[in-house]
Image: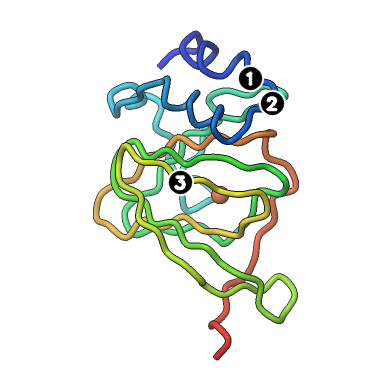
Amino acid sequence: MNLERLERAFGSLVCPSPTELRQAVASLALCPDDIASLVPQPEQLPYGRKILYLTPHVEVVLIHLPARQESIPHNHGDSFGWEWVISGTLTNVVYLPADGEDEVFRAQTTHVSAGDCYYVAPGEIHAIRNNTDGPVLSLNVYTPPLQNSRQYRAVQSPT
Ligand SMILES: [Fe+2]
């Protein structure tokens, strides 16, 4: 993976639609070998995160979610994006607002296999989880670049 390849895929995008953004990711035709040398190790977060490419319109992030790890529930502010799984199986957990401020409860779980992608809508509250014993690598692309992301606290669902 080099900068030129990312620039070809994402450099000309201006306020892309979900479809345009998805097509740009697909055009990379990524395979695990392409990103093997770039895989970020977790530091402060439960997962490794490395920004590979950034323009005023697009942010491309490589995520490494080790076995059995999970992120904190969060949203992406006004940005939308795609999580493109390169290897492993990602579990995406969608949360809904609960009664307390910044409290959310788990509403829906989706499994995303290598080669598939998951659309994250603006404002959607979600967490990424790795339910397996192997690593998950994904390329996450957002437009506009992430700002005003917010974290939440998971509570039991209302009965
Ligand atoms: Fe996210």
Which numbered disc flags the more N-terminal residue, 2 or 3?
A: 2
Q: Quadrant of residue 110?
A: bottom left
Question: Which percent across, then down, holds residue 90?
Answer: 36, 51
Which of 39 and 106 lies nearest the eye of the viewer?
Answer: 106
Q: Which residue is mark 2?
A: 57
Gap in Å between the C-alphas at discs 2 and 3? 20 Å
- Among all residues in the image, which is located at the extreme top? 4
Above or below residue 36? Residue 73 is below
Q: Are marks 1 and 3 in contact (CB under 8 Å)?
A: no
Kind of residue at disc 2: His
Tell me which residue sits at (61%, 30%) in the image.
Answer: 59
User: Does dot 3 land on a helix, a strand or a loop?
Assistant: strand
User: Looking at numbered disc 1 in the image, what kind of residue is underneath it?
Assistant: Leu
- Beta carbon of the mark 2 residue lies under 8 A of ligand 1: no
Residue 121 against residue 125 in the figure, above or below: above
Q: Secondary structure at mark 2?
A: loop
Q: Amino acid at mark 3?
A: Tyr
- Say whether marks 2 and 1 touch (CB < 8 Å): yes
Which residue does the numbered mark 3 point to in the structure image? 118
Q: Which residue is mark 1?
A: 13
Discs 2, 3 touching: Cβ within 8 Å: no
* Label of residue 36 in the image: none
Q: Position of residue 138 (x, y in %)?
A: 41, 39
- Most extreme residue toward the bottom is 159
Relative depth, front residue between 42 and 95: 95
Q: Is residue 130 left or right of residue 75?
A: left
Q: CA distance from mark 2 to mark 1?
A: 7 Å
Please state the horizontal and vertical placement of residue 136, each as a whole percent of the image: 34, 45
Residue at 62%, 56% in the rendered image: 124
